[in-house]
Amino acid sequence: MSEPIMSEIKKGHIHKLLSTGKRVDGRALDEYRPISIETNYIESAQGSARVRLGNTDVLVGVKMEVGTPFSDTPDRGVLTTNTELIPLASPTFEAGPPDAGAIELARVIDRGIRESEMIDLKKLCIKEGEEVWINFLDIYVLDYDGNLFDACFLGAIAALRTTMVPAKENDMGEDYPMPLSHLPIQTTVVKIENSILFDPTLDEEKVADARLTVTTDENGDLRAMQKGLAGAFTLDEVKQVIDMSLRVSKDLRNIVG
């Protein structure tokens, strides 16, 4: 991913508005753009979802197959997360192997799902040490206008909630729903000077000093965090973000569930 370019005039406009507590699109600092979620979008996948967060558009598919477990978790299924930043989605996306941005995005999504124990991986063990279900979670960015972390995470959990384990085609009885234990939600903020903004647009990301992504579950427990960009958050700001994330995540959870 190449670095986006922004004019000094636009940067100044964003900073000037934020100094008065306003955003370019008129949203409150903790307000998300419109969200739409379509599930079962890909017929050939075991689970899928397409999410539009403002103008950011992502497609997520889940494919499952029988495979060998990792040696250190012989009684658990496997989750593998991959992201594709399709060049048509943004002038800054480049063809070729995943770059640092795509790798970070996949790791943050994977960690939020894994650390929240959303999937009961023990129930995806077929024969301990020999056969388990392998879950391939593939995320494709179709249009990029900021906040890929939250758009992709919403797509991932929506796709997983619709996933059916393909037992029948593998001669293992009838298909059954993906065994899920929790419903995590991820929220991302950026810091621009002294302002903290949820669901940043692409223009807001371009001028951001720091980024923080927080994953919480339905019980209000903190499950994962990821700091990004070169700037810093104070301890009080981190606590503020976590408190606000817990509140905002309730509305996002209702949209998914």
Image: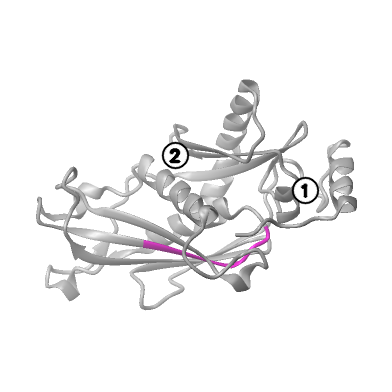
Q: Which image quarter holds the N terminus? A: bottom right
Return the x and y of residue 143 as percentages of the image width and height. 62, 67
Neighbor class of circle 1 (other Cα within 10 Å; few <14, some 14-19, many 20+) is: few
Q: Amino acid at mark 1?
A: Arg
Outermost residue toward the bottom in this view: 43
Query: Can residue 171 be seen by looking at this rendering?
Result: yes
Disc 1 + disc 2, Cβ < 8 Å? no
Q: Amino acid at mark 2?
A: Asp
Is residue 141 in the magenta section? yes
| Residue receiving disc 1 | 27
The magenta-colored residue range is 137-145
Name the mark on residue 217.
2
**Residue shown at the point (37%, 40%) measured from the top left:** 115
Is residue 126 in the magenta section? no
Query: Can residue 183 be seen by looking at this rendering?
Result: no
Q: Could you say whether the residue bearing mark 1 is in a helix, strand or loop?
A: loop
Relative to 160, is 65 above or below? below
Judged by its main secondary structure, the magenta piece is strand
